[in-house]
Amino acid sequence: MPVDGYLLKPDFTSQAGYHEGAYAAAKTAAAERVKDAGNFELYLTGLTVAAIGAVDGMRQSGIEHPVVRNFDAATKEFVRIQLD
């Protein structure tokens, strides 16, 4: 991947956590990146793009607040990610 930087520091989860905190940290970092540098390309790996596509599809279909859950390996439960 031709990248010249990262949105988040490698250890950001130690402060933000893995669920809502990770979402909020990435959202804030992206907004700051746009404010500072303008538009940028975000490179994803794996099936993340499918999850984003599903959320976009739900929103285009009239679901204002899609429900997204992420598996928490520590608790062995799915936790809801609060999307804005």
Image: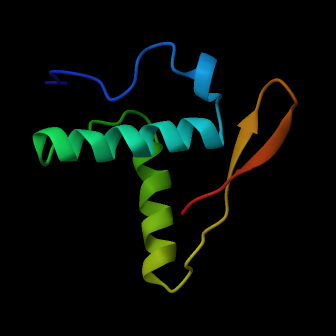
Residue appearing at x 51%, y 13% in the figure: 11
Residue 20, compared with residue 51, is above or below; it is above
Please, is residue 71 above or below residue 16 in the view?
below
Q: Is residue 41 visible?
A: no
Place of residue 77 in the rendered image (x, y in percent of width and height, measured from the top left): 85, 39
User: Residue most toward the bottom?
Assistant: 62
Look at the image and name its color scheme. rainbow
Query: Can you name the residue that lies furthest to the top here?
Result: 11
Residue 54 versus residue 35 in the image, above or below: below
Q: How many marks?
A: 0
70 shown above or below 10: below
Q: Residue at x 74, y 38 (%)?
A: 71
The x, y position of residue 32, in whole percent, is 28, 41
Q: Is residue 43 left or right of residue 47?
A: left
Say which residue appears at 48% left-offset and 37% top-offset. Answer: 25
Q: Is residue 58 visible?
A: yes
Residue 59 percent location from the top left of the image: 48, 76
Quadrant of the frame with the N terminus = top left
Q: Is residue 40 left or right of residue 68?
A: left
- Which residue sits at x=42%, y=46%? 27
Q: Which image quadrant: the C terminus?
A: bottom right
Q: As drawn, is 41 to the left or to the right of 26?
A: left
Q: Quadrant of residue 3?
A: top left
**Residue in the foreground of this view, choosing between 83 and 28:** 28
